[in-house]
Structure formats: structure tokens, C-alpha cells
Amino acid sequence: MKRTKLKKLLKAIDKKVKVSEANLKENKVSADLTSKTAGASWSAAGEREYTAGQLEINQKVFDQIIKLQREIAKQVESEIPEKVETPCYVVIRSNKGTNNIFIVKNVTSINGFNLVSSESPMGKALIGRKVGDTLETGIGADVELLEIG
């Protein structure tokens, strides 16, 4: 069985890459224009610094999305594993309800998807587990692994 949940995530990531790339290009144009006009006043110099900061932030976001895209693309055609690995879709249940999450190395915000770092306490606790395993949290909220995808 193929990893359909990862395919859905990859499609959402691909859309975010396009949006992020467009934002980055727009910021570069803005930064170029601001740098050409910023020598005349303190206010203009402040605008230059602000624009450069925005460009740096958008570049980091774009780079993180690309890393996530590559991570998911490498595994999207593989078979569903018996044990949780990175990247992986899992369904867990606790006393707070059922949650659908993706365990990934490169976490970023993707609308409609709950991404959890493989380096987080939850990610580390889930790696290597099988369906039916129960994770004891030590705070009375045990977590059961219901599905791997």
C-alpha cells in the first residue's frame, strides 16, 4: 500500500513552495528598489533595514519548505512502514481525543496539516513504534498508536 497521506501533504507543500517563491521574488524586487532610494534619509535607511530583514526571513521560510518538500518526496512512493519512521503519518489517541500527525525532520507551517518534529518529545516517543503500541507519558495521558501511513 502506498503512502497516500504523504502524497496529500506533498501537494500542499508544492502549493506553499509556489506561494513562498512568489513572495520571495516580490521581496527581492522591493529590497532592490529600497536599496536604490535609501541613501537620502534616516527613514529611508530604516526602510532598507526592514526590507532586508523581511527578505532574510522569507528566504529562511522558503529554504525550510524546500527541505520539507525534498524529505517528503523521497518517501512518498515507498511502502507504508510497519514501524513509525521519519517522515511518517500517524494517528494517535489519548484522553484528549484522536490526532492525525506527520512526523518530519523539517517542520514548517502547512495549513491543514499537523507536523511534529522527529526531535520533539512526541516524535522521539513515536519513532520505532507499531500500531497498537501505547506510550506512557508519565502524566496520566497515555497515547495509543492507531495507524501508520
Image (cartoon, rainbow, N blue to C red):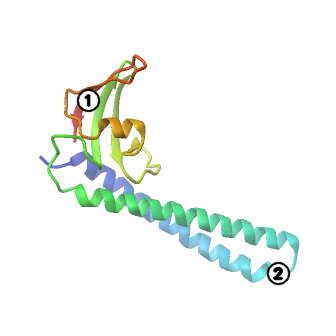
Where does residue 94 sit, x and y in percent of width and height? 35, 22
Q: Which residue in the protein does label 2 denote?
A: 39
- Between residue 26 and residue 87, name the one nearer to us: 87
Question: From the viewer's perspective, is the residue at label 2 or at label 1 nearer?
Answer: 1
**Residue at image x 43%, y 58%?**
16
Is 148 located above or below residue 15 in the figure?
Answer: above
Q: Is residue 83 left or right of residue 52?
A: left
Where does residue 35 sit, x and y in percent of width and height? 72, 79
Q: Which mark is residue 65?
A: none
Is 36 located above or below residue 98 in the figure?
Answer: below
Which picture quadrant has residue 46?
bottom right
Give the residue furthest to the left.
1
Q: Is residue 6 left or right of residue 95?
A: left
**Residue at image x 74%, y 72%?**
48
Give the residue furthest to the bottom.
36
The quadrant of the rendering that contains the C terminus is top left
Three-letter amino acid code at disc 1?
Leu
Marks 2 and 1, Cα distance to the nearest angstrom? 59 Å
Where does residue 76 sit, x and y in percent of width and height? 23, 55
Where does residue 2 sit, x and y in percent of width and height? 15, 49
Is 62 located above or below residue 102 in the figure?
Answer: below
Q: Which residue in the protein does label 1 denote?
A: 145
Q: Earlier in the sequence, mark 2 or mark 1?
A: 2
- Between residue 23 and residue 3, name the one nearer to us: 3
Which picture quadrant has residue 24?
bottom right
Mark 1: secondary structure: strand
**Residue at image x 33%, y 23%?**
136
Three-letter amino acid code at disc 2?
Gly
**Residue at image x 51%, y 68%?**
22
